[in-house]
Image (cartoon, grey):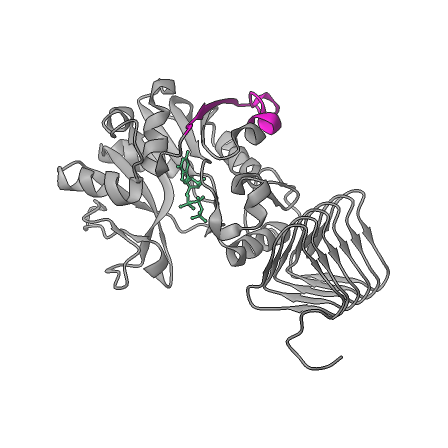
Amino acid sequence: MSARDVQAVILVGGKGTRLRPLTLSAPKPMLPVAGLPFLQHLLSRIAAAGINDVVLGTAFQPQVFEDYFGDGSKLGIKIRYVHETEPLGTGGGIRNVYDSLTADTVMVFNGDVLSGADLDALIETHDSSGADVTLQLFRVADPRAFGSVPTDETGRVTAFLEKTQDPPTDQINAGCYVFKRSIIGDIPSGREVSVEREVFPQLLASGKHIQGHVDNGYWRDMGTPEDFVRGSSDLVRGIAPSPALPGDRGESLVHEGAGVAPGALLIGGSVVGRGAEIGARARLDGAVIFDGAVVEAGAVIERSIIGFGVRVGPRALIRDGVIGDGAEIGARCELLRGARVWPGVTLPDGGVRFSSDV
Ligand code: GTP
Protein backbone atom coordinates (compact mmCIF):
# COMPACT_ATOMS: atom_id res chain seq x y z
CA MET A 1 0.00 0.00 0.00
CA SER A 2 1.28 3.49 -0.71
CA ALA A 3 0.56 6.80 1.00
CA ARG A 4 -1.73 7.75 -1.91
CA ASP A 5 -4.18 5.06 -0.76
CA VAL A 6 -4.35 6.58 2.71
CA GLN A 7 -6.63 9.37 3.91
CA ALA A 8 -5.54 11.67 6.73
CA VAL A 9 -7.69 13.00 9.55
CA ILE A 10 -6.39 15.79 11.76
CA LEU A 11 -8.06 16.59 15.08
CA VAL A 12 -8.04 20.34 15.57
CA GLY A 13 -11.09 20.86 17.79
CA GLY A 14 -9.47 21.18 21.23
CA LYS A 15 -9.75 24.30 23.37
CA GLY A 16 -6.01 24.36 24.09
CA THR A 17 -6.52 25.38 27.71
CA ARG A 18 -2.88 24.85 28.63
CA LEU A 19 -1.85 27.52 26.14
CA ARG A 20 -4.24 30.16 27.41
CA PRO A 21 -4.49 33.07 27.05
CA LEU A 22 -3.12 32.71 23.48
CA THR A 23 -5.83 30.18 22.64
CA LEU A 24 -8.65 32.49 23.71
CA SER A 25 -8.39 34.26 20.35
CA ALA A 26 -6.99 31.54 18.08
CA PRO A 27 -7.20 27.74 18.03
CA LYS A 28 -3.92 26.12 19.10
CA PRO A 29 -3.11 24.62 15.67
CA MET A 30 -3.40 28.12 14.12
CA LEU A 31 -0.91 29.82 16.45
CA PRO A 32 2.12 31.00 14.48
CA VAL A 33 5.24 28.87 14.78
CA ALA A 34 8.32 29.94 12.83
CA GLY A 35 6.10 32.33 10.87
CA LEU A 36 3.37 29.87 9.82
CA PRO A 37 0.27 28.51 11.53
CA PHE A 38 1.44 25.40 13.34
CA LEU A 39 -0.96 23.26 11.31
CA GLN A 40 0.77 24.26 8.08
CA HIS A 41 3.93 22.46 9.17
CA LEU A 42 1.88 19.30 9.78
CA LEU A 43 -0.08 19.61 6.52
CA SER A 44 3.15 20.09 4.57
CA ARG A 45 4.57 16.96 6.15
CA ILE A 46 1.45 14.99 5.23
CA ALA A 47 1.59 16.35 1.66
CA ALA A 48 5.32 15.59 1.39
CA ALA A 49 4.61 11.98 2.39
CA GLY A 50 2.25 11.70 -0.59
CA ILE A 51 -1.06 11.76 1.28
CA ASN A 52 -3.30 14.21 -0.55
CA ASP A 53 -6.76 13.77 0.98
CA VAL A 54 -7.12 15.40 4.40
CA VAL A 55 -10.17 15.82 6.66
CA LEU A 56 -9.99 18.33 9.51
CA GLY A 57 -12.17 17.52 12.52
CA THR A 58 -13.10 20.92 13.95
CA ALA A 59 -15.02 22.01 17.04
CA PHE A 60 -13.56 25.18 18.55
CA GLN A 61 -13.35 28.22 16.19
CA PRO A 62 -13.82 26.17 12.98
CA GLN A 63 -14.00 29.08 10.55
CA VAL A 64 -10.42 30.17 11.23
CA PHE A 65 -9.12 26.97 9.63
CA GLU A 66 -11.29 27.19 6.54
CA ASP A 67 -10.56 30.88 6.00
CA TYR A 68 -6.83 30.19 5.99
CA PHE A 69 -6.47 26.82 4.25
CA GLY A 70 -9.57 26.77 2.04
CA ASP A 71 -9.79 23.66 -0.13
CA GLY A 72 -6.07 22.95 0.37
CA SER A 73 -5.12 23.56 -3.26
CA LYS A 74 -2.36 26.02 -2.29
CA LEU A 75 -0.66 23.16 -0.48
CA GLY A 76 -1.38 20.73 -3.31
CA ILE A 77 -3.83 18.65 -1.28
CA LYS A 78 -7.59 18.33 -0.83
CA ILE A 79 -8.87 19.53 2.55
CA ARG A 80 -12.40 19.01 3.84
CA TYR A 81 -13.84 20.17 7.15
CA VAL A 82 -16.19 18.24 9.42
CA HIS A 83 -17.52 20.23 12.34
CA GLU A 84 -18.72 19.13 15.78
CA THR A 85 -21.35 21.49 17.16
CA GLU A 86 -20.51 20.12 20.62
CA PRO A 87 -16.89 18.98 21.11
CA LEU A 88 -16.90 15.17 20.96
CA GLY A 89 -13.41 14.53 22.33
CA THR A 90 -10.56 12.83 20.48
CA GLY A 91 -12.42 9.54 19.84
CA GLY A 92 -15.74 11.24 19.10
CA GLY A 93 -13.96 13.60 16.72
CA ILE A 94 -12.53 10.65 14.77
CA ARG A 95 -15.96 8.95 14.64
CA ASN A 96 -17.58 12.18 13.48
CA VAL A 97 -15.61 12.26 10.21
CA TYR A 98 -16.50 8.62 9.36
CA ASP A 99 -18.93 9.55 6.58
CA SER A 100 -16.16 11.48 4.81
CA LEU A 101 -13.85 8.48 4.70
CA THR A 102 -13.56 6.36 1.57
CA ALA A 103 -10.08 4.82 1.96
CA ASP A 104 -9.70 1.55 3.87
CA THR A 105 -6.68 2.95 5.70
CA VAL A 106 -6.92 6.20 7.65
CA MET A 107 -4.08 8.01 9.35
CA VAL A 108 -5.20 10.15 12.29
CA PHE A 109 -3.10 13.00 13.70
CA ASN A 110 -3.39 15.16 16.77
CA GLY A 111 -3.18 18.68 15.39
CA ASP A 112 -0.61 19.88 17.89
CA VAL A 113 2.31 17.50 17.49
CA LEU A 114 5.56 18.60 15.87
CA SER A 115 7.28 15.57 14.49
CA GLY A 116 9.63 14.31 11.84
CA ALA A 117 8.33 10.75 12.02
CA ASP A 118 8.54 8.59 8.93
CA LEU A 119 4.92 8.20 7.84
CA ASP A 120 5.76 5.63 5.14
CA ALA A 121 7.38 3.39 7.76
CA LEU A 122 4.27 3.68 9.94
CA ILE A 123 2.03 2.66 7.01
CA GLU A 124 4.39 -0.23 6.24
CA THR A 125 4.16 -1.52 9.83
CA HIS A 126 0.38 -1.28 9.70
CA ASP A 127 0.26 -3.10 6.40
CA SER A 128 2.70 -5.89 7.19
CA SER A 129 1.35 -6.58 10.70
CA GLY A 130 -2.25 -6.71 9.52
CA ALA A 131 -3.24 -4.70 12.60
CA ASP A 132 -6.63 -3.11 13.17
CA VAL A 133 -4.88 -0.02 14.51
CA THR A 134 -1.21 0.94 14.52
CA LEU A 135 0.03 3.50 17.03
CA GLN A 136 3.08 5.60 16.52
CA LEU A 137 5.16 5.43 19.69
CA PHE A 138 7.98 7.61 20.88
CA ARG A 139 10.46 7.05 23.71
CA VAL A 140 10.76 9.78 26.36
CA ALA A 141 12.81 10.15 29.52
CA ASP A 142 9.77 10.81 31.72
CA PRO A 143 6.64 9.09 30.40
CA ARG A 144 4.35 10.03 33.32
CA ALA A 145 2.67 12.95 31.54
CA PHE A 146 1.77 10.82 28.50
CA GLY A 147 -0.09 7.66 27.55
CA SER A 148 2.30 4.79 28.23
CA VAL A 149 2.11 1.95 25.69
CA PRO A 150 3.91 -1.34 26.44
CA THR A 151 4.37 -3.81 23.56
CA ASP A 152 5.37 -7.49 23.36
CA GLU A 153 8.40 -8.84 21.47
CA THR A 154 6.50 -8.66 18.15
CA GLY A 155 5.59 -5.00 18.71
CA ARG A 156 1.95 -5.78 19.52
CA VAL A 157 0.45 -3.41 22.09
CA THR A 158 -0.36 -5.15 25.39
CA ALA A 159 -1.85 -2.25 27.38
CA PHE A 160 -2.74 1.42 27.06
CA LEU A 161 -2.18 3.35 30.26
CA GLU A 162 -3.11 7.04 30.06
CA LYS A 163 -0.97 9.30 32.29
CA THR A 164 0.06 6.90 35.04
CA GLN A 165 2.51 7.61 37.88
CA ASP A 166 4.27 4.28 37.44
CA PRO A 167 4.61 3.66 33.68
CA PRO A 168 5.92 0.19 32.76
CA THR A 169 7.72 1.47 29.64
CA ASP A 170 9.24 4.65 28.23
CA GLN A 171 7.20 4.22 25.02
CA ILE A 172 4.47 6.81 24.78
CA ASN A 173 1.54 7.46 22.49
CA ALA A 174 2.84 9.96 19.92
CA GLY A 175 -0.65 11.12 18.86
CA CYS A 176 -0.55 9.60 15.37
CA TYR A 177 -2.49 6.45 14.49
CA VAL A 178 -3.35 4.31 11.48
CA PHE A 179 -6.87 2.85 11.60
CA LYS A 180 -8.70 0.34 9.49
CA ARG A 181 -11.72 2.40 8.48
CA SER A 182 -14.18 -0.18 9.84
CA ILE A 183 -12.76 0.28 13.36
CA ILE A 184 -13.64 4.00 13.19
CA GLY A 185 -17.21 3.05 12.29
CA ASP A 186 -17.42 1.03 15.51
CA ILE A 187 -16.63 4.01 17.78
CA PRO A 188 -19.86 5.14 19.49
CA SER A 189 -21.35 8.14 17.70
CA GLY A 190 -23.11 11.25 18.94
CA ARG A 191 -21.40 11.48 22.32
CA GLU A 192 -18.06 12.49 23.77
CA VAL A 193 -15.46 9.72 23.51
CA SER A 194 -11.76 9.79 24.36
CA VAL A 195 -9.61 7.75 21.98
CA GLU A 196 -6.94 7.41 24.67
CA ARG A 197 -9.14 6.58 27.65
CA GLU A 198 -11.95 4.64 25.98
CA VAL A 199 -11.33 3.50 22.40
CA PHE A 200 -7.84 2.00 22.74
CA PRO A 201 -8.45 0.22 26.09
CA GLN A 202 -11.73 -1.23 24.75
CA LEU A 203 -10.16 -2.39 21.50
CA LEU A 204 -7.50 -4.20 23.53
CA ALA A 205 -10.08 -5.71 25.87
CA SER A 206 -12.06 -7.05 22.91
CA GLY A 207 -8.95 -8.74 21.43
CA LYS A 208 -8.41 -6.38 18.50
CA HIS A 209 -4.88 -6.21 17.11
CA ILE A 210 -3.14 -2.95 18.01
CA GLN A 211 0.41 -2.70 16.78
CA GLY A 212 3.07 -0.30 18.05
CA HIS A 213 5.54 1.43 15.76
CA VAL A 214 8.44 3.13 17.54
CA ASP A 215 9.89 6.13 15.72
CA ASN A 216 13.18 7.70 16.77
CA GLY A 217 12.81 10.97 14.89
CA TYR A 218 12.00 14.41 16.29
CA TRP A 219 8.81 14.56 18.38
CA ARG A 220 7.20 17.23 20.55
CA ASP A 221 3.65 17.81 21.76
CA MET A 222 3.22 21.58 21.46
CA GLY A 223 0.44 21.76 24.09
CA THR A 224 2.21 23.70 26.87
CA PRO A 225 3.98 27.07 26.73
CA GLU A 226 7.30 25.40 27.53
CA ASP A 227 6.94 22.92 24.65
CA PHE A 228 5.57 25.56 22.30
CA VAL A 229 8.66 27.72 22.90
CA ARG A 230 11.01 24.75 22.52
CA GLY A 231 9.30 23.51 19.36
CA SER A 232 9.33 26.96 17.81
CA SER A 233 13.00 27.42 18.61
CA ASP A 234 13.80 23.95 17.20
CA LEU A 235 11.98 24.81 13.97
CA VAL A 236 13.78 28.13 13.63
CA ARG A 237 17.19 26.50 14.14
CA GLY A 238 16.45 23.50 11.90
CA ILE A 239 16.52 20.98 14.77
CA ALA A 240 12.89 20.14 14.04
CA PRO A 241 12.07 19.29 10.43
CA SER A 242 9.38 21.04 8.38
CA PRO A 243 8.89 20.79 4.62
CA ALA A 244 7.16 24.21 4.87
CA LEU A 245 10.46 25.93 5.78
CA PRO A 246 13.71 26.31 3.85
CA GLY A 247 16.40 23.74 4.59
CA ASP A 248 19.02 26.22 5.76
CA ARG A 249 17.86 27.93 8.92
CA GLY A 250 19.69 30.10 11.43
CA GLU A 251 19.87 31.19 15.03
CA SER A 252 16.84 33.46 14.74
CA LEU A 253 14.10 34.35 12.28
CA VAL A 254 12.94 37.91 11.59
CA HIS A 255 9.87 38.26 9.37
CA GLU A 256 9.22 40.84 6.72
CA GLY A 257 8.21 44.27 7.93
CA ALA A 258 9.78 43.70 11.36
CA GLY A 259 12.36 46.15 12.66
CA VAL A 260 15.34 45.21 14.82
CA ALA A 261 17.30 48.16 16.24
CA PRO A 262 21.10 48.14 16.37
CA GLY A 263 22.51 46.39 19.40
CA ALA A 264 19.53 44.08 19.90
CA LEU A 265 20.55 40.46 20.42
CA LEU A 266 18.42 37.62 18.99
CA ILE A 267 19.51 34.12 19.96
CA GLY A 268 18.19 30.69 20.94
CA GLY A 269 15.89 30.28 17.93
CA SER A 270 13.99 33.51 18.61
CA VAL A 271 11.37 34.53 16.08
CA VAL A 272 10.12 38.05 15.39
CA GLY A 273 6.73 38.31 13.67
CA ARG A 274 5.64 40.56 10.82
CA GLY A 275 5.63 44.23 11.64
CA ALA A 276 7.08 43.68 15.14
CA GLU A 277 9.67 46.12 16.50
CA ILE A 278 12.64 45.19 18.67
CA GLY A 279 14.36 48.11 20.42
CA ALA A 280 18.04 48.85 20.92
CA ARG A 281 19.92 46.51 23.28
CA ALA A 282 16.87 44.31 23.77
CA ARG A 283 17.85 40.69 24.35
CA LEU A 284 15.69 37.86 22.98
CA ASP A 285 16.65 34.30 23.84
CA GLY A 286 14.19 31.60 22.75
CA ALA A 287 11.53 34.30 22.40
CA VAL A 288 8.43 33.92 20.24
CA ILE A 289 7.26 37.40 19.25
CA PHE A 290 3.94 37.42 17.39
CA ASP A 291 3.11 39.92 14.64
CA GLY A 292 2.91 43.58 15.51
CA ALA A 293 4.40 43.30 19.02
CA VAL A 294 6.81 45.96 20.27
CA VAL A 295 9.74 45.17 22.57
CA GLU A 296 11.34 48.38 23.76
CA ALA A 297 14.98 49.21 24.42
CA GLY A 298 16.85 47.05 26.89
CA ALA A 299 13.98 44.61 27.53
CA VAL A 300 14.93 40.96 28.05
CA ILE A 301 12.69 38.12 26.87
CA GLU A 302 13.68 34.52 27.54
CA ARG A 303 11.72 31.37 26.60
CA SER A 304 8.45 33.30 26.40
CA ILE A 305 5.59 33.91 24.00
CA ILE A 306 4.62 37.52 23.31
CA GLY A 307 1.14 37.76 21.73
CA PHE A 308 -0.11 39.86 18.81
CA GLY A 309 0.31 43.60 19.29
CA VAL A 310 1.78 43.36 22.82
CA ARG A 311 3.97 46.24 24.03
CA VAL A 312 6.86 45.35 26.35
CA GLY A 313 8.30 48.45 27.99
CA PRO A 314 11.97 49.45 28.32
CA ARG A 315 14.11 47.14 30.51
CA ALA A 316 11.23 44.82 31.33
CA LEU A 317 12.18 41.19 31.95
CA ILE A 318 9.96 38.30 30.83
CA ARG A 319 11.24 34.77 31.51
CA ASP A 320 9.12 31.64 30.92
CA GLY A 321 6.00 33.77 30.48
CA VAL A 322 3.00 34.05 28.16
CA ILE A 323 1.68 37.50 27.32
CA GLY A 324 -1.81 37.69 25.81
CA ASP A 325 -2.63 39.74 22.71
CA GLY A 326 -2.56 43.49 23.08
CA ALA A 327 -1.26 43.54 26.68
CA GLU A 328 1.01 46.40 27.79
CA ILE A 329 3.91 45.49 30.06
CA GLY A 330 5.30 48.58 31.75
CA ALA A 331 8.97 49.52 31.92
CA ARG A 332 11.10 47.45 34.34
CA CYS A 333 8.33 44.96 35.11
CA GLU A 334 9.62 41.45 35.88
CA LEU A 335 7.44 38.49 34.87
CA LEU A 336 9.01 35.14 35.68
CA ARG A 337 8.37 31.39 35.98
CA GLY A 338 5.12 30.71 34.18
CA ALA A 339 3.56 34.17 34.52
CA ARG A 340 0.57 34.64 32.20
CA VAL A 341 -0.84 38.05 31.37
CA TRP A 342 -4.37 38.12 29.94
CA PRO A 343 -5.13 39.94 26.66
CA GLY A 344 -5.42 43.71 26.86
CA VAL A 345 -4.16 43.96 30.45
CA THR A 346 -1.92 46.94 31.25
CA LEU A 347 0.82 46.62 33.88
CA PRO A 348 2.16 50.03 34.94
CA ASP A 349 5.87 50.86 34.86
CA GLY A 350 7.64 48.89 37.60
CA GLY A 351 4.27 47.41 38.63
CA VAL A 352 5.37 43.76 39.00
CA ARG A 353 8.79 42.98 40.45
CA PHE A 354 10.54 39.90 41.81
CA SER A 355 13.52 41.88 43.02
CA SER A 356 13.59 44.94 45.28
CA ASP A 357 15.78 47.06 42.95
CA VAL A 358 14.07 50.14 41.61
P1 GTP B 1 -5.65 21.31 26.37
O1 GTP B 1 -7.00 21.89 26.71
O2 GTP B 1 -4.53 22.24 26.67
O3 GTP B 1 -5.44 19.92 26.93
O4 GTP B 1 -5.57 21.13 24.76
P2 GTP B 1 -6.56 20.39 23.73
O5 GTP B 1 -7.95 20.84 23.97
O6 GTP B 1 -6.01 20.63 22.36
O7 GTP B 1 -6.47 18.86 24.13
P3 GTP B 1 -5.37 17.78 23.70
O8 GTP B 1 -4.03 18.43 23.61
O9 GTP B 1 -5.50 16.61 24.58
O10 GTP B 1 -5.89 17.39 22.25
C1 GTP B 1 -5.14 16.58 21.38
C2 GTP B 1 -5.60 16.90 19.96
O11 GTP B 1 -6.97 16.58 19.81
C3 GTP B 1 -5.47 18.38 19.61
O12 GTP B 1 -5.02 18.48 18.29
C4 GTP B 1 -6.88 18.92 19.77
O13 GTP B 1 -7.16 19.98 18.87
C5 GTP B 1 -7.73 17.70 19.43
N1 GTP B 1 -8.99 17.66 20.18
C6 GTP B 1 -9.16 17.66 21.53
N2 GTP B 1 -10.46 17.59 21.85
C7 GTP B 1 -11.15 17.57 20.67
C8 GTP B 1 -12.54 17.50 20.33
O14 GTP B 1 -13.44 17.49 21.19
N3 GTP B 1 -12.86 17.46 19.01
C9 GTP B 1 -11.90 17.50 18.02
N4 GTP B 1 -12.28 17.49 16.75
N5 GTP B 1 -10.58 17.58 18.31
C10 GTP B 1 -10.21 17.60 19.62
| Residue at image location 22% in from the left, 50% down from the top | 151
The residue stretch that appears in magenta: 66-85
Q: How many marks?
A: 0
Instruction: State whether residue 223 appears in this view.
Output: no
Which quarter of the figure has residue 70? Answer: top right
> Where residue 114 sits: x, y (%)?
49, 46
Image vertical order of residue 265 relative to residue 208, above or below: below
- Let me know if residue 310 is in the magenta part: no
> Where residue 206 sits: x, y (%)?
13, 37
Image vertical order of residue 282 relative to residue 15, above or below: below
Q: Quadrant of the C terminus?
A: bottom right
| For residue 4, side relative to residue 128 (left or right) | right
> Where residue 343 sits: x, y (%)?
64, 50
Foreground residue among 50 and 282: 282
> Where residue 194 sits: x, y (%)?
30, 40
| For residue 343, side relative to residue 113 (left or right) | right
Q: Residue furthest right?
A: 262
Image vertical order of residue 47 relative to residue 73, above or below: below
- Let me know if residue 76 is in the magenta part: yes
Q: Quadrant of the N terminus?
A: top left
Q: Quadrant of ligand 1?
A: top left
| For residue 149, side relative to residue 61 (left or right) | left
Instruction: State whether residue 309 appears in this view.
Output: yes
Foreground residue among 76 and 95: 95
